[in-house]
Image (cartoon, rainbow, N blue to C red):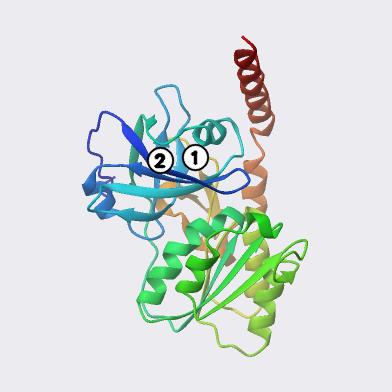
Amino acid sequence: MRNICKEVMPLHEVIRKELLAPKIHLMEVEVAPRMAAKILPGQFIVLRLDERGERIPLTPVSVNEKKGSLTVIFQEAGLSTKRLGALKEGDTISDVVGPLGRPTDIKRYGVVIAVGGGIGTACIYPEAKALKGAGNRVIGILGARTAELLILGEEMRSVSDETYIATDDGTKGHKGLVTDVLKEIIEGGEKVDLIVAVGPAIMMKAVADATRKQNVKTIVSLNPIMVDATGMCGACRVMVGGETKFTCVDGPGFDAHLVDFDNLLSRLKMYSEEERRALELYERNVVADALR
């Protein structure tokens, strides 16, 4: 709780909005300057559209302390992110709370591989930038289903000594998975001191499996269902090394080789039916309003 810096603001204005890829938005939001000044790589914020809105955890891609703003990238996946994606510049958000979670341990390791899968690249970029600034040799690996969904390619290249691309359909870079590229680098004799990976849970599980035999330290940023994000509700609990951890206060970064990914994947599906129905109802109401 001591890391939370919340200044009361009437509303948080959307300063800038861009569509980076289909259903993937960049949004710069006005926040209290003291909050922007305290956010470190690896930490996250929670925003709420209005008093009835769901709490949405997002990782800032960048912050502007002077301006008093932070920038997030998100993908429309369910009702809340679809509503967030419908906002325009000048619209407002009710609440922004942060920084939350533990920051990434930034220091000089040596050779670091930063793996971003899909929207996870938005989380890995600030970590890769900070690790490069600490004197590490950074190798970036970015993946997506198709080239159209790749994001922050130029930004990652600017903080990486080498950058590799992997797409499932082969429309850009290696045809296949980020783990194919990762294995090739490790098995090619590169001495790797640290791997940081963010992306879909199944991707992070594959990264953990790929690096476990080589015993390369691997940190993943987990994305479980989250509610209050302050350690009180327990909704974001994950199993790490056989112990229950709360992602919001103990993470979100954990040793990938200790994470029970099967448990995480199971918990992520708990409310999929309710999420589907809520989104369908919202879209029906949008259509009905448009026809009035």
- On the image, the x and y values in percent for residue 127 come to 43, 65
Residue 46: assigned label: 2
- On the image, the x and y values in percent for residue 114 come to 53, 70
Residue kind at label 1, given as amino acid type: Met
Q: Residue at x 50, y 81 (%)?
A: 161
Asked where in the image residue 141 lies, by quadrant, the reply is bottom right
Q: Which of 23 and 37 is in front in this view?
A: 23
Q: Nearer the viewer, residue 264 or 169?
A: 169
Label 1 packing within 10 angstroms: few (<14), some (14-19), many (20+): many
Task: Name the element at disc 1.
Answer: loop
Residue kind at label 2, given as amino acid type: Val
The C terminus, quarter of image: top right
Residue 242 in view here:
no
Task: Name the element at disc 2.
Answer: strand
In whole angstroms, how far apart are the C-alphas of marks 2 and 1?
10 Å
Residue 226: assigned label: 1
Q: Residue at x 68, y 68 (%)?
A: 166
- On the image, the x and y values in percent for residue 276 come to 68, 29
Asked where in the image residue 46 lies, by quadrant, the reply is top left
Asked where in the image residue 4 lies, by quadrant, the reply is top left
Q: Which residue lies furthest to the top in this view?
A: 292
Asked if disc 2 and disc 1 are in contact, CB closer than 8 Å, the reply is yes
Residue 91 in view here:
yes
Q: On the picture, is 221 further left or further right than 102?
A: right
Q: Residue at x 56, y 64 (%)?
A: 256
